[in-house]
Amino acid sequence: MHTKPDDQQTVVDLPWDMAELVGEIDFLLITLDTLRFDAAQDAWCEGRLTTLAPYLGSDGWERRHTPGTFTYAAHHAFFSGFLPTRADPGLTPRLFAPRFPGSETTTSRTFVFEEPTLPEALAARGYRTICIGGTGFFNPASALGRVLPGLFSESHWRSEFGVTDRRSERNQIECAMDRLAEAGSRRTFLFVNISAIHQPNWFYGSQTNRDTLQTHKEALIAVDRALAPLFELCQQRGRTFCVVCSDHGTAYGEDGHHGHRVAHEVVWNVPYAEFLL
């Protein structure tokens, strides 16, 4: 345990020794783009997350705060080790972190590296790093859309992975499974930016061409179904350390807000889970 002398905040060490796990297991990072905490927790409470529920524990999702209110900012933080932080007071230990003088949340069990990002660090250690893009910041048609995928050894994006495709979640997972199968026995870091929950999502259960909090939740449930074969494949490959979280939430009229890139609690509060497959 590390103590911060000026305000007495403490950070309890990680339950996982990430430094020891690197090189021994695969890593899977899934961002459920735009997913709100309340919608995610409601879906769990209703018993509709059949794939994810076994890994969420007795209380469902952990509520955390995102480091960014939109996709680009949040993912830049994630890839440098700044994952969503605990919502209750206290410091959140980092699973992985570039070496950074004065870091108060790097612990004895954090995977610390010299490279600026996790994809680059794992690639330097022999991992095949795979990006399956979804939302527009992973679309290589623009220079900006090539920044985040450019951190990976290989990246994949097609229009069928994007927010307007009615089966984007299945298309993305099928591609992810193909890439894992092609990797063979080589250790992998697989990242999937799931786009289905991002607007437009009205086609998940609505006939009105209007996005709602209910269609937002129904999109998550479709994603949960799509994840089942990917989890099975990961288990067949061996142990996989997984982080499943949202990058930010989105507003559906709360206090007059719509969308995200605003500092509202429905945007800041995100669902988070980490577990071993």
Image (spheres, grey):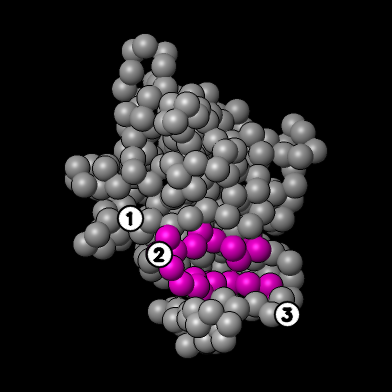
Q: Main secondary structure of the magenta part?
A: loop
Label 2 SS: loop
Amino acid beneath label 1: Trp
Residue tagged by mark 2? 88
Residue 61: image tag: 1
Q: Tell me where the magenta segment starts and ends, as one range.
A: 79-99
**Residue in the foreground of this view, choosing between 120 and 9:** 9
- Could you tell me which quadrant the C terminus lies in? bottom left
| Above or below for 74 versus 250 | below
- Mark 3: few/some/many CA within 10 Å (<14, 14-19, 20+): few
Amino acid beneath label 2: Asp
Q: Quadrant of residue 142?
A: top right
- Mark 1: few/some/many CA within 10 Å (<14, 14-19, 20+): many
Question: Residue 168: where, in percent of width, then height?
Answer: 48, 32
Q: Residue furthest top?
A: 208
Question: Can residue 276 be seen by looking at this rendering?
Answer: yes
Instruction: Name which residue lies at 59% across and 63% down.
Output: 82
Amino acid beneath label 3: Pro
Question: Can residue 185 be seen by looking at this rendering?
Answer: no
Relative to 220, is 136 on the left or the right? right
**Residue in the foreground of this view, choosing between 8 and 182:** 8
Relative to 163, is 15 on the left or the right? left
- Return the disc, 1 or 2, that comes first in the chain's sequence: 1
